[in-house]
Every structure is written in C-alpha cells, then in structure tokens.
Image (cartoon, rainbow, N blue to C red):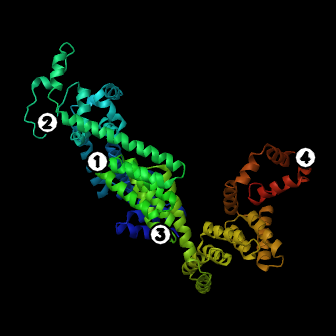
Amino acid sequence: MADEAKAKGNAAFSSGDFNSAVNHFTDAINLSPTNHVLFSNRSAAHASLHHYEEALSDAKKTVELKPDWGKGYSRLGAAHLGLNQFDEAVDAYSKGLEIDPSNEGLKSGLADAKASASRSRAAAPNPFGDAFQGPEMWTKLTADPSTRGFLKQPDFVNMMKEIQRNPSNLNLYLKDQRVMQALGVLLNVQFRTQQAGDDMEVGEEEMAVPSRKEPEVEKKTREPEPEPEFGEEKERKEKKLKAQKEKELGNAAYKKKDFDTAIQHYSTAMEIDDEDISYITNRAAVHLEMGKYDECIKDCDKAVERGRELRSDYKMVAKALTRKGTALGKMAKVSKDYEPVIETYQKALTEHRNPETLKRLNEAEKAKKELEQQEYYDPNIGDEEREKGNEFFKEQKYPDAVRHYTEAIKRNPKDPRAYSNRAACYTKLGAMPEGLKDAEKCIELDPTFSKGYSRKGAVQFFMKEYDNAMETYQKGLKHDPNNQELLDGVRRCVQQINKANRGDLTPEELKERQAKGMQDPEIQNILTDPVMRQVLSDLQENPAAAQKHMQNPMIMNKIQKLISSGIVQMK
C-alpha cells in the first residue's frame, strides 16, 4: 500500500539512504499518483542526491497537485537554487510566502536565494572571457599549428568547452600548458613557460604582439625555447600515435571475435599511454564478452580511478561505471545481488545521464523486484495469512484483515481468493476503487470464480452503476447459474432500474444519478450521437416515429441506459 511505501521512504530518508528513499517514494507514487506529499518527499530525496533536474520535476508536480500548499513552493525553490536558477528560486519562495507568510523554511530559503542572486550579479567577469566566445575560438585554434593537434585530444576539447561556457573556469586549468598555449594564440600573445634550471627572465619583446614587418623578432623569441621540451612533446605524440594504432588493432580483433588478440593489443596500448582510459574500458568490454566478469569489473574500477586522476571526460567515466553495472548484473542470481548493480548504474547517471544507462537501471530494478517476489513466494504461508484475514473480517476489524490479505497476495499472487476477500474488505471500508481493482484482478486470475463477479457487482452497485452491476452479475451466472448471491444481486439491480423507469426517484436521487450518468463516457457518446438525438426528439414530438425506433434493439438498449441513469424519464 502507498502508506507503507511512504513510511519506508521516510525511514530511508531519515537514515541518509536517499537512493532507497527515492525508490520507496516511487513505489508509493505508483500506488497513489495524485498524492502531492509523495512527490514533495521524492523531490527532497532527489535534491539530497544533488539530482536537481529530477527534484525540480517532482516539485512542479507537487505544486500542480496542491497549489495552495506552501511546502511545495519550498521544494520548488530548493530545486531552482540547486540548478543556480536564482531568480526562479526567489519567485518560488515568494509565491510560497504569499500562501503561508509565517513559514520559516520559506523565509530562510528566500533569504538564501536573494543572497545567491546578489553574489551572482556581483561576480567580476573574467578579463579573458571575450577571447573564448563564439566559433572564432575554434577557428583560431585550428589555424595555429601549435594548437591544432590539441583539438584531437578529448580532455583538451572538454576543458575549452568548460572555459567557453564559463570563462571563470579558466583559473582551474591554467596549470595545463596546452591551455596556456591556447590562451596565447587567442590573445595573439606568445607565452613561454620557464623550465627547471632555466634562469633566463622573459624580456618585454617576448610578450609583445608579433609584428609582420619584423620577422627577426619572431625568430628571436623562438630561439630561447629549450630543445628538450620539443623532444618530450614529440615523444609524447609518437607514443599516443603508437597506442592508437594498438587500439585500432584491438578493435579489429574484437569485431572478428578474436578476444585474446584484442586483449593483447589493448594491454599494449595501456602500457604505452596511461593517460587515455578508453584502452582500459575497451579491454573491460572484451572481458565482458568473454564472460570474465570479475576481470571486467577490475578494469572498470581501474578506469574510473585513473579517469578521475586525469580529470578525463565524465562520459568516459560513466561508460566504465555502466559496463561495471552490466558485469555485476550478469553475475546476479538473487534479488540482493542487484543492489550493487542498481547503485553502480545510479553512480554512472550522476556522471552522465545517458538514456541507455537509464534503461539498464530500470531493467535491473524490475529484475530485482521480480526476484524478490519469487523468493517471497510461499503458498502455504499465503493460506495461513488469508485465514488470519478471515478471522479479522469476521470480527469486523477490516484494516487488520486487509493487512493479512495483502501479505497473502505477496506470498501467492496467483490466488484469486485473497483478492476476492480483500475486495470485500475494501467495500466495507468504502474504498470502492481499490475494491473494484481487486475484484477485476480476481476475475482475471480465474474467470470461472463466481465470488469475483459478486464482489465486482457489489462495488458497482454501491457506486450506483446499476446497469454495469447487472451486466457483471449476469456474466457470473453464466458460470454458476444457481448462485444465490449473484441472483440476489440481479434482483437488487432490477429494483433500482425499475425505480428509475417508473419515475419514483426523489429529486435528490434523480439529481445524483443524472450527475453520475453525465460522467459516463457511454452516456456522453449516446447524447452526442446525431441519430439518438433525433430519436429523443421523436419520443417527445412524434409518437409514431418513436414506436418504429423502439423496434430497433440497439436503440432500445441505449434508451434504457439513459432511463437508468435518470437522463430520460418515462411518464
């Protein structure tokens, strides 16, 4: 039940297990999709995991379901704040305070949002910001021989994108000589880094803008560059090219299913160049294909660790984590084995929200749930729980009976009797939609089980859907023609339908029945049907034509439906 899942979510949240809290609140939402508190709680759990996009989505749903609830706006403001959307956060907190002016959480949130907005506006722009703006940056870097090669290196391209997105990030990457070289190209200034043991000072002419009219100055500025640095860079490039060739050979072997050869080439590439984690993730893929899941997991862990040391592309780290999750999933035999699988996929999604990883996460969660049900399956315990429920039902302790019937269903989801009994409890508690759902499940599991039809008919009767109840009872009688409970149900429905036909309804009963009828899609279709509108007109103005209409069984059934719903009255 939704309350049970919500309680588990609250407990997990209180203990700091936010991933489990999200899962429990999701289960509760599936059972009760219009409960605003559940979306609010899941938003808080997502925010605690720094999943602010998901937190924002849940907060918006909370406000949509309950627009007069201040806490919803508090969740909305917190999500906007996490996404650095300070103005939107201020608006959200302000709207919340209009509804609940004394709410301290909203007041505190508004103060934080305003302070963050002020700091954001007051932040000094990076003096080099203009150099990184627009497509001209990439054009300059491609045109210059000293930076052209850097554009083939993914980590350099990602750094430049980060700086272009937010020039303030330049300070984070200034220690990288490639970034310094790129900055010099973009500013049209030649930088030179002093090497260890080099006591020379940089003269003013070396920092000046090169002049086309004085090529000798350009020549002078290049002369002091130490030869060893050029040699190291050349050696580095040669290593990378050699490693790339090994990787290509590994890829070719992998496609031919020659896995041992592929592993040899990827391992050689790793030895030559330890600054590219793609060689490790590729070797992990081979181990995965070979069914060597432990080896695959070791390689994935190594790739993640090395990738974080090198500040590699977050997508590559995410790929390694996803591959590890797949290997763990292949090894899973019981429901508990899926816990590290789910956790690993969730970590991958924090690095990069890839649709394929999300799909695999959903599949792992589904597999875990199915295994839990299989492991929990025990028909004998299910029968015991059903009997306990029966005892509480006799004592009219319906909530306790529901609890035991629910446990019986968990132990044996294919027992129609447990669904039938729980439907009876829900009917006694006035929870008609839940009772109807259980009765329909009972009929689905065993279409010949007469109790399922009597439960469903009873719910429909209490909901004053007399035609539907009559139809349900009659279907049940096809399987059990002498069932007294079904026969009594038919009799009660006939009495109510005839009461409407005779016009014996009180004004309140008539009004209620008409309102309910107008919500029925079948009634709506009848009233909008041009043919039926003509028939209704003839009933009032042309008795002879009306008599002809009455000879048509389909039209007669529709008129009977309108009479039963109180829309049409015969006098």
The answer to the question of whether label 2 and label 3 lie on touching residues, with beta carbons closer than 8 A, is: no
Name above or below for residue 26 compared with residue 377. above
User: Residue at point 81% right, 76% down?
Assistant: 480
Residue 113, numbered label = 1
Cα distance, mark 2 to mark 3?
A: 55 Å
How crowded pointer 3 is (Cα within 10 Å; few <14, some 14-19, many 20+) is rated as some
Residue type at mark 3? Asp
Among numbered discs 3 and 1, the one appearing first in the sequence: 1
- The residue where tag 3 is placed is 337
Q: What secondary structure is marked by label 2?
A: loop
Among numbered discs 4 and 1, the one appearing first in the sequence: 1
Name above or below for residue 12 compared with residue 209. below
Mark nearer the viewer, 2 or 3: 2
User: Residue at point 17% right, 14% down?
Assistant: 214
Cα distance, mark 1 to mark 2?
A: 45 Å
The answer to the question of whether label 3 and label 1 lie on touching residues, with beta carbons closer than 8 A, is: no
Among numbered discs 1 and 2, the one appearing first in the sequence: 1
- Judged left or right of residue 451, residue 333 is left
Residue 194, numbered label = 2
Cα distance, mark 2 to mark 4?
A: 106 Å
Q: How many marks?
A: 4
Coordinates of residue 29 in the picture (x, y in percent):
50, 61
User: Residue at point 29% right, 37% down?
Assistant: 163
Cα distance, mark 4 to mark 1?
A: 73 Å
Residue type at mark 4? Ala
